[in-house]
Image (spheres, rainbow, N blue to C red):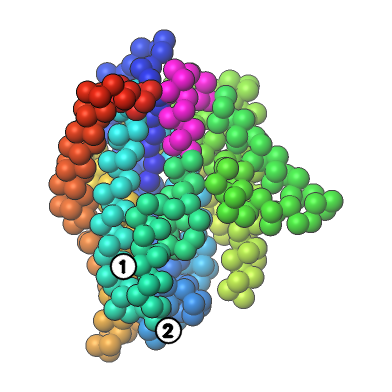
Amino acid sequence: MASVSTGSEPSAAPRAQGPRPLIGLDLLRFGAACLVMLYHLGCTAWMVPSSEAAVLVGSPIPFPTLLPVSAQGWVGVQMFFVISGYVIAYSASNASASRFLTGRILRLMPGVWFCATVSFGLALLFFPDSVWILLERYGRTLILFPVPRWIDGVYWTLGIEIVFYALVYLLLCLNRFERLEPVVMAVGVISALAWLLAAAPVFPDLDRIISTRIAKLVLVTHGCHFALGVLLWSAARQGLTVTRMAALAVCLTGAFLQIRYDAGFVGASLGLDRSPAMPWLFYAVFMGLFCLSIRVNTALTDIAPGLGRRFRDLGLATYPLYLLHTFVGALTMRFLLAHGLPPAVDLAGGILVAVAASLVVSRRVEPPLRARLGRAVETVGTKLRSRGLVLGALTR
C-alpha cells in the first residue's frame, strides 16, 4: 500500500531505465496483509464483540490455540509502513511530481471507491447502525477523511500513508527529491526520540499522547517505520555509511518501542499477555527478510524474469485484500458456520474467499476503473492548461 513520487521534473541525478519488480517485497506485503487478516478473523472476531468482524460473523467462533500468533497480527501494519517507505522512495526516484501525484491517485482511489462501496452495501444488510450513520461513514471513506469513523476500521492507515506521500510530493514540487533521505531521516529520528522519551519514567503519559490520531497524522507515531524503509532504499543505492547505520539503529529502536506500546495496548484490550516478545519477533524476522529480499532481488529477476510477474499479482492484490478482508472474510465465516462446518474450516474458508476476492478486484475491477479515472484526470488537466490555470507541478 505504498508508493510515492514528487514535484516538478527531477533535478540532477540521472533516472534509472526502468524499475525492476520487487519480488521479495511483493511477497512480504502480501504476508503482512495476511497477518492483519488473521488478527481480525482469528482474534477480534470472537474476542472483541464490538468489532466489525464480530458483528459480521454473528456468533463467536473461538480459536484459542491460534492466539499466540493471531493476537499479534496487527504488527502487519507496521510492516506495511516500512515497505511504504522503501517502495515510495523507489518509485518516486523515477517520476516527476505530476506523474507521482497522478500515480498515487490512480493507485489509491479506485480501490477505495469500489471496496468501500462493497463494504457499505454489506453493512446495510448486516450492521445494526442506521442508514444515515452508515452513509456518513461511507462518505468519509470515499474522500479518505483523516479522522474516524469510516465504513471499516482498516481505513485508519490510509490517512497516514497520504501524509507520507504528501511529504514526498512536496519535495518533488520543490525539485528537491535528493533531500528525501535527510528529511525522512529527521522525521524518523524525531519519532524514535519521542518513543525513547516515552519509555523514560519521567514521562509516564507521553506514549499515550504520541499515539493519538493527530500524532499519527504528523508521523510522530510511525515515522520511524517509514524512515527505515527510506534509509534501506538509500543504502541499497549508495551503500551503508556511518550516518545511515546510526539513523537505522535509532529508528529501529524507536520502531521496537512503538511496537511495545501497541502490544501493551492490545494485550490490555484483549485481556491477554502484554509482552511485546512475539510482535518483536515477527518484526525482526520481517526486517531480516526485507533486507535479504533487497539484496537478492537483482539476481532473482535475472534468473527468473517471469517470477516477478507472478508475485506482482499477489502484491497488487494486497491493497484490496486489506480493504475487503473484514467484510468478505467474516461473512464467509458466518455462512460456513450456518451450514454446520467446523471452526477451522470456517476460518480457512474466510481467508481463502477474501484472497480470491482480492485477486478478482486487482485483476478485473481496478484496471478498468483506473483507466477511466486516468482519462478523467487527463481531461481535467487539459482543461486547466487550456484556461491558463496551471497550478504548479500538478498540471505539468
**Most distant residue in the front direction:** 387
Q: Is residue 245 above or below residue 198?
A: above
x and y percent of residue 72 in the render?
Answer: 52, 62
> Looking at the image, which residue is at 69% across and 54% down?
209
Label 2 close to label 1 by CB (< 8 Å): no
**Image quadrant of residue 169?**
top left
- Tell me if 254 is positioned left or right of 106 in this view: right
> Looking at the image, which residue is at 40% across and 26% down?
6
Q: Tell me which amino acid carries mark 1.
A: Phe
- Tell me if 367 is positioned left or right of 113 in this view: left
Magenta span of residues: 164-181
Q: Tell me which amino acid carries mark 2.
A: Pro
> Looking at the image, which residue is at 65% across and 57% down?
261
Can residue 295 be seen in this snapshot? no
Mark 1, residue position: 120
Mark 2, residue position: 60
Q: Does 327 lie within the magenta span?
A: no
Q: Nearer the viewer, mark 2 or mark 1?
A: 1
Q: Secondary structure at mark 2?
A: loop
x and y percent of residue 144 in the render?
Answer: 40, 52
Residue neighbourhood size for the residue with mark 1, other residues' Cα within 10 Å, grouped as few (<14), some (14–19), many (≥20):
many
Ranked by sequence position, the earlier of labels 2 and 1 is: 2
x and y percent of residue 239 in the render?
Answer: 50, 20
Camera-side residue of 300 and 80: 80
Q: Is residue 349 above or below residue 198?
A: below
> Looking at the image, which residue is at 22% across and 23% down?
386
Residue neighbourhood size for the residue with mark 2, other residues' Cα within 10 Å, grouped as few (<14), some (14–19), many (≥20):
some
Camera-side residue of 75 and 112: 112
Q: Secondary structure at mark 1?
A: helix
Q: Which part of the image, by quadrant, shows the C terminus?
A: top left
Disc 2 and disc 1: Cα gap in Å? 22 Å
